[in-house]
Amino acid sequence: MTEQVTVAPAGVADAGEILTVQRAAYLVEADIGRLSVAPDQQGRGVGARLLAAIEAACAGRVDRFALFTGADSADNLRLYDRRGYRVVAHRPDPNGFRLAVLEKTLVGSARRDA
């Protein structure tokens, strides 16, 4: 079963899908993908609040979070590091830009559906 949850600030109609919870017998992972914040809203803590909202929406339901960002996006990498994410791989995007793939594994996860 795949469940999709969209998190966006009020009034943002084009925020798009930023979270898909993948359910499997052995693991439940929140695949965030790429978290994007409008350029005029960057540096105001919007990304941190969105990430916190995603994590809260998945509380007790996932064992791991996964996402990606530009490998040279120092501000994004700092945010994710502060939130407990670790770079697990690098890969190119379709345009050849280098991406960092990050994961956060929850220790002692107590999923409600486990």
Image: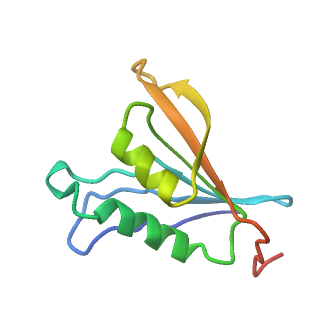
Q: Residue at x 44, y 44 (%)?
A: 77
Q: x, y (%) of residue 7?
A: 40, 68
Q: x, y (%) of residue 23?
A: 73, 61
**Within the image, what quadrant is residue 37 found in?**
bottom left
Q: Is residue 10 left or right of residue 79?
A: left
Q: Residue at x 68, y 78 (%)?
A: 60
Q: x, y (%) of residue 30?
A: 61, 59
Does 93 sit above or below residue 83? above
Q: Is residue 59 left or right of residue 52?
A: right
**Within the image, what quadrant is residue 25 found in?**
bottom right
- Quarter of the image with the N terminus in it: bottom right
Does 40 sit above or below residue 106? above
Q: Residue at x 59, y 72 (%)?
A: 58
Q: x, y (%) of residue 9?
A: 28, 71
**Residue that protrudes farthest toward the bottom in the picture:** 112
**Residue that protrudes farthest toward the top in the picture:** 96
Q: Residue at x 60, y 46 (%)?
A: 86
Q: How many marks?
A: 0
Q: Is residue 40 left or right of residue 36?
A: left
